[in-house]
Image (cartoon, rainbow, N blue to C red):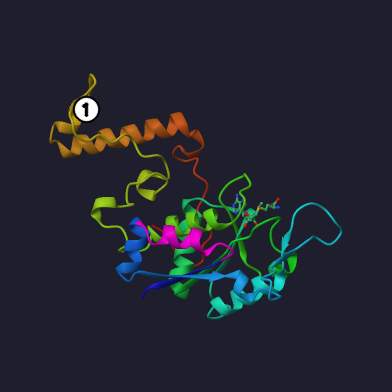
């Protein structure tokens, strides 16, 4: 069954372009996912296309009004069982564990809806009425939720079964269980020597067991050097997903 991913946004063209490209586009062409982009402005409160207004109590910036956002989400969502994500700098910080958790929830429901905020953000009543899960892609503030939504979709779609072939497998990537949540080591391809830098001998030895051992050592070394917080045993325990999701 294909997963229906729906994005609620003020800027549909930003989303469509990326979702039709590369592996995300191929996933749709292969029938693993479908994408739908819903324009909040289609449910504007007046014929001028108004979807935002000044905040009550004063202050700079505009706030996305509740009615167009709530009603676009209601039109997008099959029912309340569909996971609903609101992109927000104040949300749960995205990492590979959260990606897997969201992928499992979305796959179980067959549908996922993501809402992109803009300006100062959305009226609080959107949150009160729809109770979305708020997701942040990091501790910085972007102009809108479109790039964060695309980040979530990209990270999630590549973890759906069958989306990546062998040629771009996620199996041994950084943060996966195969590397104990750590970082991947270095990769080399042709030519064997470039500007005096040779490919490590072992990689052209043809000795697969030794190559695997070398790669595992490089991965541990790199993790220790760059991300001691991820080094073996320090990885935080997976969230209690309650749905058996995992790698
Ligand atoms: C300018 S931001 C609003 C920031 C908000 N006033 C605050 O201080 O938290 C506009 C929109 O961009 C999105 N956004 C910005 N930074 C984000 C982040 N780090 N992660 C996820 N979404 C983000 C959200 O959808 C947000 O509603």
Residue at 82%, 53% in the rendered image: 59
Provide residue 143's location: percent of width, then percent of height: 62, 51
Residue at 75%, 54% in the rendered image: 61
Disc 1 within 8 angstroms of ligand 1 (CB):
no
Q: Is residue 14 magenta?
A: yes
Residue 128 occupies quadrant? bottom right
Q: Could you tell whether 47 is left or right of 233 in the image? A: right
The secondary structure making up most of the magenta span is: helix
- The residue pinned by badge 1 equals 199
Residue pushed farthest front? 48
Q: Residues within 10 Å of mark 1 (few under 14, many from 20)?
A: some
Provide residue 36's location: percent of width, then percent of height: 47, 71
Locate the N terminus and report the quarter of the image it occupies.
bottom left
Q: Is residue 208 magenta?
A: no
Residue pushed farthest left? 206
Position of 130 relative to 14 (above/below): below
Q: Is residue 130 visible?
A: no
Q: Nearer the viewer, residue 201 or 72?
A: 72
Provide residue 81's location: percent of width, then percent of height: 55, 77
Residue at 24%, 51% in the rendered image: 167
Position of 146 relative to 243 (above/below): above
Q: Nearer the viewer, residue 213 or 139?
A: 139
Residue 49 occupies quadrant? bottom right
Indicate the secondary structure of the residue bearing disc 1.
loop
Give the magenta range: 9-21
Provide residue 87's location: percent of width, then percent of height: 59, 58
Q: Is residue 46 visible?
A: yes
């Amino acid at each position: 069954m294909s997963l229906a991913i729906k994005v609620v946004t003020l800027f549909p063209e930003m989303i469509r372009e990326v979702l039709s490209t590369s592996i995300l586009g191929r996933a749709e062409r292969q029938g693993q996912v479908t994408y739908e982009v819903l324009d909040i402005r289609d449910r504007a409160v007046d014929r001028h296309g108004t979807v935002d207004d000044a905040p009550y109590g004063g202050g700079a910036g505009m706030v996305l009004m509740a009615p167009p956002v709530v009603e676009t989400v209601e039109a997008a969502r099959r029912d309340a069982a569909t996971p609903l994500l609101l992109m927000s700098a104040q949300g749960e910080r995205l990492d590979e564990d959260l990606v897997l958790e969201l992928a499992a929830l979305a796959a179980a429901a067959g549908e996922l809806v993501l809402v992109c905020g803009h300006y100062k953000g959305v009226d609080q009543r959107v949150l009160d009425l729809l109770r979305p899960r708020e997701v942040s892609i990091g501790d910085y503030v972007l102009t809108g939720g479109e790039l964060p939504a695309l980040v979530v979709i990209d990270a999630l779609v590549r973890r759906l079964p069958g989306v990546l072939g062998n040629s771009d497998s996620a199996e041994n990537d950084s943060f996966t269980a195969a590397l104990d949540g750590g970082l991947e080591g270095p990769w080399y391809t042709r030519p064997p020597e470039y500007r005096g830098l040779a490919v490590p001998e072992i990689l052209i030895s043809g000795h697969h067991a030794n190559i695997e051992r070398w790669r595992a050592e490089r991965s541990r070394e790199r993790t220790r050097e760059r991300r001691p917080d991820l080094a073996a045993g320090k990885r935080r325990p997976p969230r209690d997903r309650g749905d058996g999701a995992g790698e």
